Image (spheres, coloured by chain):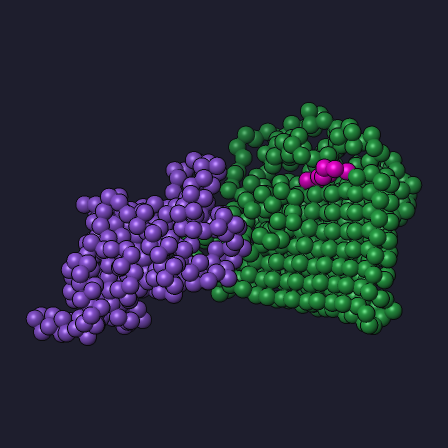
Amino acid sequence: MKTETKAVDINRNIGDFAYPEVHVRDAGTGLSEKTIHYISDVKEDPDWVREFRLRGLKTFLEKPLPTHWASKDLETINFDKIRYYLSPGTTAKRSWDEVPEDIKRTFERLGIPEQERKFLAGVEAQFDSEAVYSNIKKAVGEQGVIFVGSTEGLKNHPEIFRKWFGKVIPIADNKFSALNSAVFSGGSFIYVPPGVKVKHPLQAYFRINAENFGQFERTLIIADEGSEVTYMEGCTAPKFNTATLHSAVVELVALKGAKIQYITVQNWSANVFNLVTKRGLAHENAEVKWIDCNIGSRLTMKYPSVVLKGRKSRGEVLSIALANNGQHQDTGAKMIHAADETTSNIISKSISIGTGRATYRGLVHVPKHLKHCKNNTECDALLINATSRTDTYPAITVRGTGNAVQHEASVSQVSAEQIFYMQQRGLSEAQAMSLSVNGFVNDLVRQFPMEYSVELKRLIELEMEGSVG
Amino acid sequence: MRQLSVENLHVTIADQQIVRGLSLDVPRGEVHAIMGPNGSGKSTLAKVLAGHPDYNVTRGKVTMDGENLFELEPDQRARRGLFLAFQYPSEVPGVTIANFLRAAVQARLPEGEELEATDYYAKLYEKMELLGMDRAFTSRSVNEGFSGGEKKRTEILQLAMLEPKYAILDETDSGLDIDALKTVAHGVNSLRGPNIGILLITHYQRILNYIVPDHVHVMVQGRIVRSGGKELALELEERGYDWAREAEGEMALTR
C-alpha cells in the first residue's frame, strides 16, 4: 500500500499515530523455514547466520511457553498471525535528508533528529524490521567507535561480531531468545576500542508502525578494555486493536575495566507483548549498569542480568515499572556472581494503577566457593488504587561464608488524605497523583541522565492524566 | 460580597451529626477566631469548607465572594483563593517543598504560562526568612520526618506563598512551643491586610495573644453559641467551656 494520506489519527499519547505502510519486503504471515530463508535471502546473510537462524527456529518450536510460572496471557499470542519481517527495502541512511519522507516524518514527530543535535553522540532509528537511519558524530567515529545496525555489523565486522554474538545469551536461553535468534533483524552493533570513553550517549530508537507485526531487534555491544559507553534506547508503537510482539535480545560485553551503561525508556502502547532478554557479561573490574524504565505494553517480561565473570566486577540494575489499567509489568533483575569480590546492586520501583499489575522477580546467585561478594536488593511497590496489584518473588541464593547480602522490600499506597492535601493546594487529582508517583521514584530518577529523567517525568504525567477521572 | 459566608450549615459523617446549623461571615480584612472544646465540630467545619470527600453536607450553603463552594472541587476552591492550614498535614514522600510549592503556584497561572523560576525562588526565600526557616529546608520532602513545629511552619510558608483570599488555620497552635508559636504568629500577622479574611480555629486562648482577632465565636456541639470581640476569648478562658455550654442550653430552650 503506497497511498499517501494526510489525515493522521492523533491521540494524547505521543507515540500513538501511524502512517500508511510502505513496505517493499514482507515475509508474510506466520513462521516456518520458508520465513527464515526469505529473511536470509533478503538480508543476504552469510551461511553461518542462516544456520544460526534455522537452529533458532528449531529450538523455538521445541521449547514450551514458560506459563508454569509466567502469565497465562502468553498463550494468547498467535504466532501464526504475526508478520516477522517488514522493511521498506532500503539501507540505513547516514543523513536524515536521504530517509524516505514518510518515515522521516515519524521520527521527527518523536523528536529524534532534534535530540541528536542536542546531546547525542550517535543515533540509529529502526522502523519495523530495519534501521532506516544510522549515524555517528564524526569525532566519535574517528576514535574507532563502531555504531551500526546488526546486519551491517555482522557483514562488515565479522571478526569482532562473530566472536561474541550469541555467546552471552545462547539460542536456547529461553523460548523468546530462540525466536529472536530465528528472525532477528535490526538492533545495534557497537564496538568501543580500548581506552576510548564515549562522552555523549549513543541512542537507538525502535519504532513499530505496522499492525500484526513482530519486531525482533538484536543488539550487541562490546566495550573493549578500559573503555566507556552509554547507550540509550527508546521505543513506541501506535495503538492497534491486534496484538503486536516485540522480542529483542541484547548482549553486552564489558572487557577488563570497561563500563557500559544501558538505558531503556519504553513507552509501548497497550497492545504490545514485550518479551525481551537482556544480559551483560562483566570481565575483571568491569561494570555493567542497566537502567530500565517500563511504561506501557500489555505484558512486559524482562529481567536484565549481569554475569559477574571477572574479579571485582560490578553489576547494577535500576528499574522503574508503571503498570496501568489492564497492563502487567513482570520485570526484575538477575545477578550471577561468578568471581571473588564482585558486587551487585538492584533497585526496583514499581507503580500499579487501576487494575494494573506489577511483578518483581529477582535472582541473585553467589556460589559457595566465592569470597567477598556483595549484593544489595531493594524493591519498592506503590499501589494507587484498591484494585491495583503487586507481587514480589525474590530468589537469593548465597552460599559459603564471607559474602554479604542485603534485601529490603516495601509496599506503600497513595492515601486519600495525601491526595486531598495536595488538592487543597490547588493541584488537580491527576496532578496530585503524578506528583506523588514522581516523588516515589525520585531518588532513583536522580541517578539517570538529565534528559531522560525529564522524559520519564513527562511520561508519568501523561499516564496519570489518562488514568484519573 | 467580599466574604466567606456560611449559612445554616449541617454536616454529617457516617450518619452522625457534627455540624448543626452553623452560620458565620468572614469578610476580607478581618480575622475571626472560632474557639471550642474537643468534639465541637471545629475541624469538621474546616474540612467541609475545603471540600473533604468524607463529609456530607445535609443542609445549608457556603459562598466565597458570592460563589457557591459546594459546586467546586477541592482544587478549584483552592485555586479560587481558599487555603486550609491543616491540623495534621500529610506527608508527600519524595516531593521536595520547593517542587511541591512550585507545582501549586504553577497551578494558579493561566494555561500555557510558565512560572519564572528566579522570581519564584526569590519569593520563596523571602517568605522563609520571614518564618525563620533555613533555605536548606526547601530540599526536604514535604512533611516527611518533620517535627510538629516544622509542619506548622511549613503550612504557614505555603499560606504565605499562595496568597489566598481566605485562610482557615486549623489548630495551628497545637503542639507548638512558645518560640515557635511567636514565629508562626509573626508570619500570619505579616499577611494580615484588606485582601485576606482569616478564620482561626483553636482550642486555647493562648494564640490569640499573638494573633489578635477582630471577632471571636464560641462553638459548642456543632453551632456557634456566642460571638463577640477579642475580649470574649479572655472571658471564655476565665469561665471555661461549661459557661459556653450553658449558652448552648439557653439557645436550645429558646427554639
Is A399 above or below relative to A207? Answer: below
In this orientation, which residue lies closer to the viewer: A426 or A130?
A426
- Measuring 74% from the left and 67% from the top, which residue is drawn there? A405
Quadrant housing residue A18: top right
Q: Is residue B203 above or below residue A453?
A: below
Q: Residue at x 54, y 49 (%)?
A: A460
Task: Look at 69% across and 50% down and name the residue there.
Answer: A291
Chain A colour is green
Indicate left or right for B81 with A309 as reference: left
Percent x, y for residue A452? 63, 43
Which lettered chain is shown in purple? B
Q: Residue furthest left?
A: B254
Nearer to me, B150 or B253: B150
Residue A55 part of the magenta-drawn span = no
Q: Is residue B62 left or right of residue A243?
A: left
Place of residue A354 in the rendered image (x, y in percent of width and height, measured from the top left): 50, 59
The reply to whether residue B54 is in sight is: yes
Q: Is residue B47 visible?
A: no
Position above or below: B228 against A101: below
Q: Where in the figure is residue A415, as x and y percent of width and height?
A: 46, 62
Instruction: Tell whether position A205 is magenta.
Output: yes
Image coordinates of residue A4 in percent, x first then y, are 59, 29
Asked if residue A149 is positioned above or below residue A315 in the image, the reply reads above
- Name the quadrant of the N terminus of chain A: top right
- Residue toward you, A315 or A180: A315
Give the residues in magenta.
A198-206
